[in-house]
Amino acid sequence: MTRHCLPWTDLPETRSASGVAKRSLEGQGANKGASLVRVEVPAGTEAPRHSHDHAQFVQVIEGSGMLETEQGWVAFAAGSLFHFPAGTWHAASFETETVLVETNLPPASVP
């Protein structure tokens, strides 16, 4: 049975060599391919230019940095929202420890 209310700490954490920590809630059934991901990014981390095959929405919960897109560089802080349609490249530089929540939609090819 799917739990309808749970804390992020109940989800397993993965941590990259750079110290980025993620906890992910994956969609199931009709929501397969969708996910909600809490990301903790250490200060000084650089995310190189990349894109995804899925649409992504990001909410900055705390922290600050710079986001680069085809529209140029823009500063972000707590309360900022990002929207990246599928295939849109982006990069980021994190000035302070930052917490993000990503909403990843399933790629168009996932039923």
Image: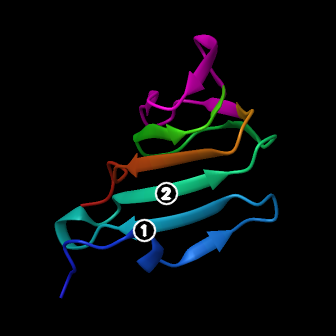
**Mark number, residue 38:** 2
In the picture provided, is 42 more to the left or to the right than 107? right
Q: Using the image, determine if residue 68 lies above or below residue 24.
A: above
Q: What x and y, as percent, mark residue 64?
A: 64, 31
Task: Please tell me which residue is depicted at 38% across the width and 48% down the height of the picture.
Answer: 103
> 95 or 29: nearer the eye?
95
Task: Please tell me which residue is depicted at 49% across the width and 57% down the height of the picture.
Answer: 38
Q: Can you tell which quarter of the image residue 11 is in?
A: bottom left
**Which amino acid, by three-letter code, is at mark 2?**
Arg
Q: What x and y, as percent, mark residue 111?
A: 24, 61
Please tell me whether residue 5 belongs to the stretch shown in magenta.
Answer: no
User: Helix, strand, or loop for circle 2?
Assistant: strand
Q: Are marks 1 and 2 in contact (CB under 8 Å)?
A: yes
**Mark 1 to mark 2: distance in Å?**
8 Å
The residue segment tinted magenta is 66-92
Q: What x and y, as percent, mark residue 89?
A: 60, 30
Residue most toward the bottom?
Answer: 1
Task: Please tell me which residue is depicted at 53% across the width and 44% down the height of the picture.
Answer: 52
> 15 or 84: nearer the eye?
15
**Looking at the image, what colour scheme do you see?**
rainbow
In the picture provided, is 11 more to the left or to the right than 39? left
Q: Can you tell which quarter of the image residue 51 is in?
A: top right
Task: Please tell me which residue is depicted at 58% across the width and 24% down the height of the picture.
Answer: 76
Q: Using the image, determine if residue 105 lies above or below residue 70.
A: below
Task: Name the magenta segment's main secondary structure.
Answer: strand
User: Helix, strand, or loop for circle 1?
Assistant: helix
**Which amino acid, by three-letter code, is at mark 1?**
Trp
Label 1 crowd bin: few (<14), some (14–19), many (20+), radius 10 Å: some
**Mark number, residue 8:** 1
Q: What x and y, as percent, mark residue 10?
A: 42, 79
